[in-house]
Image (cartoon, rainbow, N blue to C red):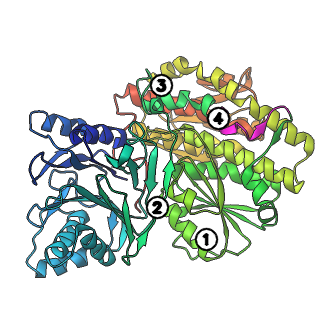
Amino acid sequence: MCGIVGYIGHREAKDVLLQGLKRLEYRGYDSAGMALIATGATKLNVYKAVGRVKNLEDLIADKDTSGHVGIAHTRWATHGEPSTVNAHPHTAAGGRIALVHNGIIENYQAIKQRLMTKGLTFESETDTEVLAALIGYLLQRGSSSLAEAVRRALNIAKGAYAIAVLDEASPNEIVVARMSSPLVVGIGEQREEFFIASDATPIVEYTHDVVYLNDGEIATISLGKDIEVIDLAGGATQPDIQSINLDIEKLEKGGFDHYMLKEIFEQPTCLRECMRGRLLRNRNEVVLSAVRDHRERLMNTKRLIIVSCGTSWHAGLIGKQLIENFCSIPVTVEYASEFRYRNPVIEPDDVVIAVSQSGETADTLAAIELARRAGAFVYGIVNVVGSSIARNTDTGTYIHVGPEIGVASTKAFTGQVLVFTLLALALGHAKGTIDIDQYHQVAQELAIIPDKIERLLQTNEQIADLAKRYTYARNFIYLGRGFNYPVALEGALKLKEISYIHAEGYPAAEMKHGPIALIDQDMPVVCLATHHQLYHKMMSNIEEVKSRGGRILAIVTEGDTAVAQLADQIIEVPPTLACLAPLLTAVPLQLLAYHIAVEKGLNVDRPRNLAKSVTVE
């Protein structure tokens, strides 16, 4: 959840670290800090500030921060409230070492008690300070190097971590390690500089050559040398240098007020990129390499299990309907956080589909390990190339929507739904379970969905005006049916995440089984009522809300008049097939949540208590 950045080289480390922290701030923004080794001296200087990275930048503006080696951190609090004491980096061994950490050390209390019997004291409430103290203790008591002290400490510590450690006695090296939390090392020209980060976004403006550390690996990074990597047993391993291709312009706002709005407007382009080479428009056919390469394994499965969290879980609910409709394979959709602890029944011929924007979601990674131990085939749907899920699955499909910086997911959701659509079409065609005319019809319509989203985005100003009417609300209900039911869940989640208005999504028919008691003149109800399956049933549900005084905002198909007569306001979406409706109906709900939050004066890209990449439980 937190962001780590580090640098060693010829540049001023402070500048690289601050820029990196700003790029990683979507991973956490409760507090920020950095540790620098001063030029011409073997002395560690540590600076910390509560709140955004800008506060740290202001703190050090008038200080002498010259130096070419440093590590930094932006925090999403897990142990202890946001404060300068709890902020990273944490120091140990009398200030000799500094450590930044993303993850959770599960047995930190036991380690802390043991260290206290040795006379060590602690200032913070964090697990990270305990890990720093353990490394410092081992370093002062016989470890031959910082890397060896880190290795010994990590054989004692249990949990998830990505760490970077500085030792003022070894001012020309940084030691890093990872377990179930991402860490990437960027390699400069001639190995004259190295960059460290939680993901590639702070690195791409300096280099495209990177090493993704694997679980249980510890690396020593020194100027002019190859990266030295060992495992937890002390054995040397060979780092795999990869090339990344990420456009730096995609990390900027590009003239938009917020990343979230930019990413909403990027969806037509992103979906075209996702379909490129996969949807053959001249033949109205879908080609997925994963289905081609693992045809028999996928065709012969008796069950698919989708594991995911949050927005990705909502995409999975849509994927379930698509796969069952087109492939005639039973599908279950599981919260990864519950699946991993439930002792689920997994058969060797099952296929488990793991869905995650970041590819680093801790619960989903744990679910993958559970599935692999049971002998299941694992398929990944992720956005980030080289992520942990991408490396730990048997096959999969990237959604290729580019970096998503806004914490509330938008383009990743539609990208995941698109990949599920492509997968269901390709697999259904291979199995012969989808009518050939329907196969070509869906493929043909899918090709023009980005054009229809572009038309839909032209309603942005209309939705911004509508949003002003709803800033008073303390609660919302979202209703949908069929393919639009998961969109109702996703729309409610978006509103909760960034406007802090309580919202719930329901299958519309379930409203009568309890939630209808909440309906009154102060309860806005968003109804997804496009011209698709169960349209007339949805009309009846709207009538029920209307008769009880609820305020209705309806998402309807262009030209609809029946729902328009019942609703207080409507937003029209272009016509499409029922199975593709979520790719359109999700967009106005994203814009609605965005504009309500803006009207309330809230930080849209950095909602409170949330972070982008959930790498801890």
Q: Which residue is at 50% across, 41% downward? A: 409
Residue 516 visible, this orientation: no
Q: Which residue is mark 3?
A: 467
Residue ID for mark 1 = 371
| Of callouts 2 and 1, the N-terminal one | 2
Query: Disc 2 or disc 4, which is closer to the eye?
Result: 4
Q: In the image, what residue type sits under mark 2?
A: Ala
Is residue 279 within the magenta segment? Answer: yes
Query: Can I make out residue 468 in this image?
Result: yes
Residue 574 image-quadrant placement: top right
Mark pair 4, 3: CA separation = 31 Å
State which quarter of the image contains the C terminus. Answer: bottom left
Local secondary structure at mark 1: helix
Q: Amino acid at mark 1?
A: Ala
**Percent position (x, y) of residue 208?**
46, 42
Q: Nearer the viewer, mark 2 or mark 3?
A: 2
Which residue does the numbered mark 4 point to in the structure image? 273
Magenta stretch? Answer: 272-282
Q: Which residue is mark 2?
A: 362
Question: Which mark is nearer the camera, 4 or 1?
Answer: 4
| Tags 4 and 1 touching, CB below 8 Å | no
Is 30 left or right of 482, judged from the image as shown?
left
Q: Which residue occupies 10% across, 74% down?
A: 120
Secondary structure under tag 4 reads helix
Q: CA distance from mark 2 to mark 1?
A: 14 Å
Q: Earlier in the sequence, mark 4 or mark 1?
A: 4
Whichever of callouts 4 and 3 sits on the residue coming sooner in the sequence is: 4
